[in-house]
Image (cartoon, rainbow, N blue to C red):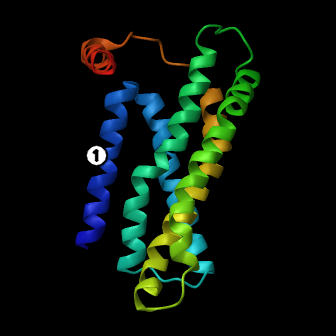
């Protein structure tokens, strides 16, 4: 129960951080939808793989929640970035172009994250490897599900939603940008 509560709190905090940076309720909702769908796909895959829902798989799900939104954020932001300057263009054509622009980067980012867990999944069967395999497989499947969702469902929803109006960077983000630029100099 405590692990599930921690996962729920972590998920809500992730949504809060998303809203803080995206500053649009609709955009945050579109991106947030990737989490439950990815988790459902992961649970189904775990069931068919013969893995039970235990503390280790729950820990893998909890660790994956923060990573599940990454692909959706990249795709959604690129869709809205390309749609904003020309609101009269066909949203489906622009969305297809936007997904194509970042598709390879999203696949590469997901693949590198999965590669981190591959040695654990492929290691010799000892006590630790058996336990860690449950966590690794759960995270890897969740990331693959997130990639599929980001390439299919998220663009479909983003094409049907009006792009949010640009509000500028805001004082907090402008200050953070200035501090970052100064640090780079």
In this view of the protein, can residue 40 be seen by the observer? Answer: no
Q: Position of residue 72 (x, y in %)?
A: 54, 40
* Crowdedness near tag 1: few (<14), some (14–19) or many (≥20) residues, C-alpha within 10 Å: few
Name the image quarter holding the N terminus: bottom left
The quarter of the displayed image where residue 65 is located: bottom left
Q: Left or right of 172: which side holds 114?
A: right
Tell whether 182 sits left or right of 58. left
Say which quadrant the C terminus sits in: top left
Is residue 103 in view? yes
State whether residue 67 is above or below residue 173.
below
Q: Position of residue 23 (x, y in %)?
A: 36, 24
Secondary structure under tag 1 reads helix
Seen at 26% across and 64% down, the residue is 5
Residue at the location (73% across, 32% down)? 100
User: Which residue in the rendered view is the most extreme toward the front?
Assistant: 185
Total marks placed: 1
Quarter-of-image position of residue 143: bottom right
Please, which residue is most extreme toward the bottom here? Answer: 126
Q: At 52% across and 47% down in the image, what residue appears? A: 34
- From what the image shows, is residue 34 above or below residue 137? above
Provide residue 110's location: percent of width, then percent of height.
58, 51
Which of the pair 59/30 is nearer the observer? 59
Q: Identify the residue under disc 1.
A: 13
Horizontal arrangement in the rendering, residue 124 relative to residue 82 (left or right)? left
Instruction: Look at 31% across and 61% down and name the residue there.
Output: 7
Q: Quadrant of residue 158?
A: top right
Residue 29 rendering spot, x and y as whole percentages: 45, 37
Q: Is residue 124 above or below residue 122?
A: below
């Amino acid at each position: 129960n405590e692990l599930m509560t921690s996962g729920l709190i972590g998920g809500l905090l992730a949504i809060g951080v998303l809203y803080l940076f995206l500053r649009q309720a609709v955009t945050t909702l579109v991106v947030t939808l990737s989490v439950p769908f990815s988790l459902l796909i992961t649970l189904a895959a775990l069931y068919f793989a013969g893995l039970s829902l235990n503390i280790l798989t729950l820990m893998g799900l909890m660790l994956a929640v923060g990573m599940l939104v990454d692909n959706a954020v990249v795709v959604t932001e690129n869709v809205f970035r390309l749609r904003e300057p020309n609101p009269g263009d066909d949203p489906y054509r622009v969305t297809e172009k936007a997904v194509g622009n970042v598709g390879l980067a999203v696949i590469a980012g997901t693949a590198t994250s999965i590669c981190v867990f591959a040695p654990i999944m492929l290691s010799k069967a000892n006590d630790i490897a058996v336990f860690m395999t449950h966590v690794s497989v759960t995270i890897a499947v969740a990331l693959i599900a997130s990639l599929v969702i980001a390439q299919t469902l998220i663009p479909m929803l983003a094409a049907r939603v009006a792009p949010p109006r640009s509000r500028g960077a805001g004082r907090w983000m402008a200050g953070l940008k200035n501090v970052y630029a100064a640090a780079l100099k």
